Amino acid sequence: MSQRPDQSQQIDELMGAFFAQARAQFGPVVKTYWFYAGDLCPGCSQPTDGVMKFKGKDALSLNAYIYRERGVLIGYLLCKTCAKTIHTAAQKNPYRQIPLHTQIEQFLSAAYLHHIRKEQA
Ligand SMILES: [Zn+2]
């Protein structure tokens, strides 16, 4: 599924760091983590390569969301357009949820449930 061998190690390291941070902040509410490695952007459902041009160089725009009902920290990448939308909104209102966040969370929750159902099958 992953065609990003150059990025996968970086993603593993980042997910580990995100998970440690979430555990420190939220405690046992966060039981595990999972990285969404699908080909569609969770924001707009368009194909994405997950790499955003940032300050002149390629940077991974790795984000994470806690799916509380399942106690899982879900890491994900956004397409350039969605990453820019989130970034711009965050600069205006740093702690405000925008509709795109809701869209992303619904997408990832469904993707995670699909993933664990496949694992159990
Ligand atoms: Zn997108």
Image: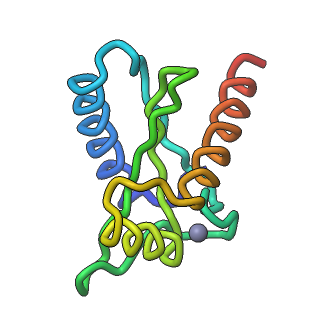
List the single residue furthest toward the top: 28
Task: Identify the residue at horizontal 56%, vertical 21% (top origin).
Answer: 70
Relative vertical location of residue 85 with respect to residue 72 in this rendering, above or below: below
Residue 64 image point, x, y percent: 41, 45
Which corner quadrant of the image does residue 110 belong to?
A: top right
Near-viewer residue (50 or 106): 106
Q: Quadrant of the C terminus?
A: top right
Q: Where residue 5 appears, x then y in whole percent?
A: 42, 56
**Count of number-bearing discs:** 0
Q: Is residue 118 above or below residue 51?
A: above
Taking the image as shown, residue 100 lies to the left or right of residue 77, namely right
Question: Hey, which quadrant is residue 87 in on the image?
Answer: bottom left
Name which residue lies at 72% across and 17% down.
Answer: 120
The image position of residue 107, as x and y in percent, is: 66, 48
Q: Nearer the viewer, residue 9 or 117?
A: 117
Quadrant hosting ligand 1: bottom right
Residue shown at 34% from the left, 53% from the top: 95
Report the front residue among 4 and 107: 107
